[in-house]
Amino acid sequence: MKIVLTTKLPAEGFAALRDHTLIFPDESAFTRTELLQNIVDCDVLVPTYDYPIDAETIAAAKQLKLIANFGVGFNNIDLEAAQNRGIIVTNTPAPVIDPTAEQTFTLMLACAHRTAELDRKMRQTNDIEIGVMNNLGISICGKTLGIIGMGRIGQAVATRAVACGMSIIYHNRHKLSDETEQKCHARYVSREELLRTADFVVLLLPYTPETHHLIDQKAFDTMKKGAVLVNTARGPIVDEQALVENLQNGKLWGAALDVFEHEPHISDALKQLDNVVMSPHIGTGTIDGRLAMCRCVADNILHFAAGDIDKMNVVK
């Protein structure tokens, strides 16, 4: 098969595909024009989660049979256009669980303890005074963590939080089994109750038209004063302007963000706020994680070639 990758990814991660033809870009990623030229006769397209694959791109790939997305999110792909062509779309859910859970926890702790803010100030100014009652943060032990989106990543965050002495509540499209709840020490609640009672609200749900601006001004009004919002899901789930206002007026203690509403543009207002911790959409960004994602993409392709559809991570 001819396999086209939109982005230069670690070649060693695709070693299992040595019997097939892999087309990598010379630079970091194909331009749109270059991609359209390369996919005319390709069988498999491997885009990264931040590379848009629209209906025009899909139409240009006359022989395309599989889109093996590099990432768990797939809102970069026009699923309807792919499905209309009978093209299978897969993703890489398993390798992203631990890296994203780790980054979620890293951001939450950094925000609670003001780590990034104080590190920055110690490097840039001489105004930081070391003292018993100076530069205080907030603890996570004994606090309530509310997780919206209790999939595998949410469950991984919950188990880490329990180990740190937090109580776990969650809201999901569907209530988890009693066994899974017990494993995660988590209790199912309505979204309103979660927002009203959680000290830390973590977003780990997919971005869909239904979840656009799920966290809006009404949600912020419901949240506890002094709560922390953590978003490692997708930026547009949060009304960013409303978030800025609630950070500025002191309703929220802070926000920890790996994703942004208008990526790659980052709001200047967010950059200016000391009570915001930011990272550049690196939830899955570890060396180990990237190689595992490559291998998961390769496995999806190999299962497709063997006709083992049931073993693929098919997006539905």
Image: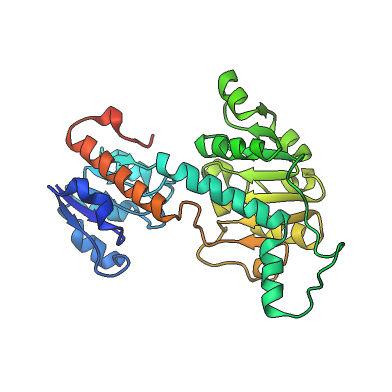
Foreground: 297 or 11? 11
* Direction top: furthest residue: 178
Q: Which quadrant of the view contains residue 133?
A: bottom right
Q: Is residue 231 visible?
A: no
- Percent of width and height locating residue 235: 56, 54
* Residue appearing at x 61%, y 36% in the figure: 158
Picture quarter with the C terminus: top left
Decide: is 166 above or below 20. Answer: above
Taking the image as shown, residue 308 lies to the left or right of residue 249, namely left
Task: Farthest residue to the right: give it.
Answer: 133
Front position in the image: 272 or 183: 183
State the image coordinates of residue 88 (x, y, percent, origin top left): 28, 38
Q: Is residue 109 left or right of residue 63?
A: right
Residue 265, compared with residue 169, is above or below; it is below
In this rendered view, identify the residue nearer to me: 19 or 124. Answer: 124
The residue depicted at 85 percent of the width and 67 percent of the height is 131
The image quadrant of residue 173 is top right
Judge whether residue 180 can be spotted in this image: yes
Q: How is the image coloured?
A: rainbow
Work out whether 232 lies above or below 117: above
Q: Residue at x 68, y 27 (%)?
A: 187
